[in-house]
């Protein structure tokens, strides 16, 4: 008999938490052992001995990021996933092995859960943008198409699309308008340059 992997969800909104629980209940090999809806999760989570913790990173304000480090140190074999449905600073996402997006299908969530447990080491992939990704971001913010970006930087359209996927993965932002705001806020482009 195989035992299910225990998952704890830390999410303040009952509808979101229960929806995720129902989705996970349909995935073989996993069970949600608890849902914690408030900020007092440290003392409650350790006795649960979860294999995976899914956290809404919006619950972790800048003053509490040390608590997440503490929790990760006290539970070294636990995989942490961020439950994302709004913009989250890349600096916060570095604490997590993966992100589960609110729009992910059950099949996609199952793949992410399995991948989290298959990799022994926490994800160390940088969320910092490369110089080329910054160039592509600026071009996107200026309203350029993939084809025109490819022509300007002497790249294939496929390479531009790959860079755009990396931008979305690293920033957590899917829309052009969101990427534009990100570029402006990070001083990559002046607001006057945006169409």
Image (cartoon, grey):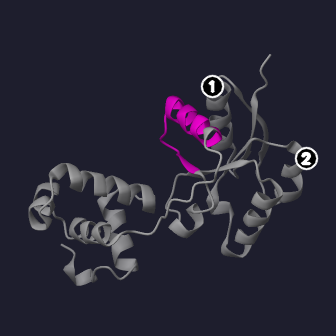
Q: Secondary structure at mark 2?
A: helix
From the top left corner, tell me how far across and down residue 125 is, in percent. Answer: 51, 59
Foreground residue, 157 or 76?
76
Which mark is first along the chain, 2 or 1? 1
Q: Is residue 155 above or below residue 77?
A: below
Read off the residue under disc 2: 47
Is the residue marked by circle 1 packed among few (<14), some (14-19), or many (20+) residues within 10 Å? Answer: some
Q: Residue at x 84, y 43 (%)?
A: 49
User: Across the whole image, how many numbered discs are drawn on residues?
Assistant: 2
Majority secondary structure of the magenta segment?
Answer: helix
Q: Residue at x 68, y 61 (%)?
A: 59
Q: Left or right of 165: which side holds 88?
A: right
Examine the image and state in which quarter residue 148 appears.
Answer: bottom left
From the top left corner, tell me how far across and down residue 182 is, in percent. Answer: 38, 71
Foreground residue, 9 or 48?
48
Q: Residue at x 68, y 26 (%)?
A: 25
Q: Residue 27, which numbered label? A: 1
Q: Is residue 116 magenta?
A: yes
Q: Left or right of 110: which side holds 14?
A: right
Examine the image and state in which quarter residue 114 appears.
Answer: top right
Q: Is residue 156 above or below residue 14?
A: below
From the top left corner, tell me how far across and down residue 113 is, in percent. Answer: 61, 37
Residue 13 in view (yes/no): yes
Q: Is residue 106 above or below residue 100?
A: above
Range shown magenta: 98-117
Q: Quadrant of the C terminus?
A: bottom left
Q: Left or right of 194: which side holds 98?
A: right
Residue 89 in view (yes/no): no
Q: Secondary structure at mark 1?
A: loop
Examine the image and state in which quarter residue 132 appears.
Answer: bottom left
- C-alpha distance separating marks 1 and 2: 24 Å
Q: Residue at x 72, y 76 (%)?
A: 63
């Amino acid at each position: 008999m195989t035992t299910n992997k225990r998952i704890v969800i830390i999410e303040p909104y009952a509808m979101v938490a229960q929806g995720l629980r129902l989705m996970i209940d349909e995935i073989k090999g996993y069970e949600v052992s608890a849902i914690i809806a408030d900020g007092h999760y440290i003392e409650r989570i350790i006795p649960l001995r979860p294999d995976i913790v899914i956290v809404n990173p919006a619950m972790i304000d800048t003053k509490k990021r040390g608590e997440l480090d503490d929790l990760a140190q006290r539970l070294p074999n636990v995989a942490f996933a961020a439950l994302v449905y709004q913009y989250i600073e890349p600096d916060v996402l570095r604490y997590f092995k993966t992100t589960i997006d609110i729009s992910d299908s059950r099949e996609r969530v199952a793949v992410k859960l399995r991948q989290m447990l298959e990799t022994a080491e926490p994800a160390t992939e940088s969320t910092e943008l490369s110089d080329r990704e910054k160039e592509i971001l600026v071009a996107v913010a200026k309203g350029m198409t993939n084809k025109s970006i490819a022509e300007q930087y002497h790249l294939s359209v496929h390479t531009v699309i790959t860079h755009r996927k990396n931008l979305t993965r690293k920033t957590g932002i899917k829309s052009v308008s969101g990427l534009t705001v990100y570029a402006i806020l990070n001083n990559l482009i002046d607001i006057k340059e945006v169409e």
